[in-house]
Image: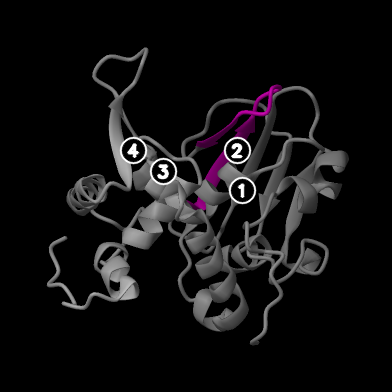
Amino acid sequence: MSQPGYKQFCPVAMAAEILCTRWTMVLIRELVAGTTRFNELRRGVPKMSPTLLSQRLKELETAGILEKKEHRFEKGIFEYHLTKAGKDLYPVVEAMGNWGQKWVESQISLKNLDPSLLMWDMRRNLDPTPLPTKQTVIQFLYPELSRSKQRWWLVIEPKGDVDLCWADPGFDIDLYVTTDLRTMTAIWMGLTTVKRESEQMKLIGTKEIASSMQIWLGLSPFATQKKLVP
């Protein structure tokens, strides 16, 4: 690791030397969530530079937390997979997320709005179970954002695969969701619900898809953790 060590034999200090550099735990969060490819990791950490991402991946590989493997069927394509030591960080990430959900004030969390990260997380956690057994396309519109970040499309295939598009995929839209980014982020984080924010949202399209939004939205893995601060 590039940072100077704590020079302590304590296991907490030694672990912190590896895990507490900038962006490292957020990157591990993405790996724990199952992301394996460089460009997909970038979408999970959109404000992290590609150079720093490469550096952190090399550091985690050196520390024995992940290994870089060439894809079995795609020559020249590499993936990053957690080792046994890396998988042992699952409960660490979960504990940090639960602590943040419980003890970090909502207003502080909601200052860090990011449409790219929100939509990527929504795509990853979406539950296709209540949706029709055909291709389903849902467009999200955030009118207050700049034109390049206003529109996003989730394309859910019949087998449950979900794609996120930032350019119009050209398919018929089953549901249009218009709201502000703060409201959508608060819903996804479990701080409020679709029903409670109905006045802040406009849903146009298939009634069944609109009525089951709270279910298929998926929500944050930490959304069920009760907030202990306002």
Q: What residue is disc 4 on?
A: 39
> What element does badge 2 sit on?
strand
Mark closest to the chain's N terminus, 3 or 4: 4
Q: Along the line of sight, which residue is nearer the eye, 72 or 65? A: 65
Question: Could one spot residue 148 in this view of the protein?
Answer: no
Q: What residue is disc 2 on?
A: 154
> What element does badge 1 sit on?
strand
Mark closest to the chain's N terminus, 4 or 2: 4
Mark closest to the chain's N terminus, 3 or 2: 3
Residue at position x 16%, y 60% in the image: 1
3 with respect to 140 (left or right)? left
161 with respect to 34 (left or right)? right
Depicted 158 relative to depicted 163: above or below:
above
Depth check, mark 4 against mark 2: the one in front is 4
Depth check, mark 4 against mark 1: the one in front is 4
Disc on res. 172? none
Q: Position of residue 95 (x, y in %)?
A: 55, 67
Q: Which residues are magenta?
A: 147-164
Depicted 171 relative to depicted 44: above or below:
above
